[in-house]
Amino acid sequence: MVTRSRGNPVAFAVAALANLAVVVIVLWILLYLLGANQDNGFVDFIHDAASWLAGWSRDMFEVSPDWWRVTLNYGIAAVVYAAVGNVVAGALRRRW
């Protein structure tokens, strides 16, 4: 008889939240680079969410041009969320 493990739901939740944060931040970077209308409700929502998530890294580096500043500072946050979230989720999976 083969049994299937359901995994750790806490680890799944941690990984899912970290990956959702990454998606929101990367989506904002893409919208910015593509010149999306920031008066649009969806674009404004994504910008606000990404700004909140990347508040700690948003002004880490003052570089020019603006597209490089947004890509670098928000990209740092995306990489940190992906790395830390998935490392924590992996540790939770191994622990329980």
Image (spheres, rainbow, N blue to C red):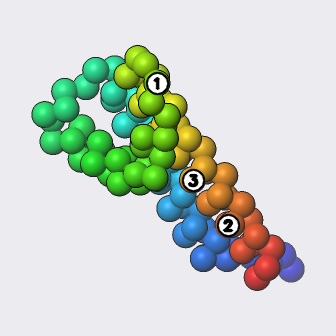
Image location (x, y in percent) of residue 55: 40, 51
Q: Around disc 1, counting alpha carbons within 10 Å, would you say few (fewer than 14), some (14 to 19), or many (20 or more)?
A: few
Task: Identify which amino acid the numbered label 2 is placed on.
Answer: Ala
Residue, disc 3 = 81
Q: Residue at 60%, 76% (x, y): give it.
A: 10
Badge nearest the viewer, 1 or 3? 1
Q: Which of the two discs, 2 and 3, labels the residue nearer the N terminus? A: 3
Residue, disc 1 = 63
Q: In this view, does 5 lie to the left or right of 85?
A: right
Badge nearest the viewer, 2 or 3? 3
Query: Among all residues in the image, which is located at the extreme front?
Result: 62
CB contact under 8 Å: marks 2 and 3:
no
Q: Around disc 2, counting alpha carbons within 10 Å, would you say few (fewer than 14), some (14 to 19), or many (20 or more)?
A: many
Q: Around disc 3, counting alpha carbons within 10 Å, would you say few (fewer than 14), some (14 to 19), or many (20 or more)?
A: many
Task: Identify which amino acid the numbered label 1 is placed on.
Answer: Val
Q: Disc 1 and disc 3: Cα gap in Å?
A: 22 Å
Q: Which residue is at the front of the view, 23 or 75?
A: 75
Please tell me whether mark 2 sits on a helix, a strand or a loop: helix
Q: Residue at 15%, 35% (x, y): give it.
A: 40
Q: Disc 2 and disc 1: Cα gap in Å?
A: 34 Å
Residue, disc 2 = 89
Q: Disc 2 and disc 3: Cα gap in Å?
A: 12 Å
Q: Which of the two discs, 2 and 1, labels the residue nearer the N terminus? A: 1
Q: Residue at 33%, 27% (x, y): give it.
A: 32
Q: Which residue is at the front of the view, 69 or 44?
A: 69
Image location (x, y in percent) of residue 3: 80, 78
CB contact under 8 Å: marks 2 and 1:
no
Please tell me whether mark 1 sits on a helix, a strand or a loop: loop
Task: Identify which amino acid the numbered label 3 is placed on.
Answer: Tyr
Quarter occupied by residue 93 = bottom right
Please tell me whether mark 3 sits on a helix, a strand or a loop: helix
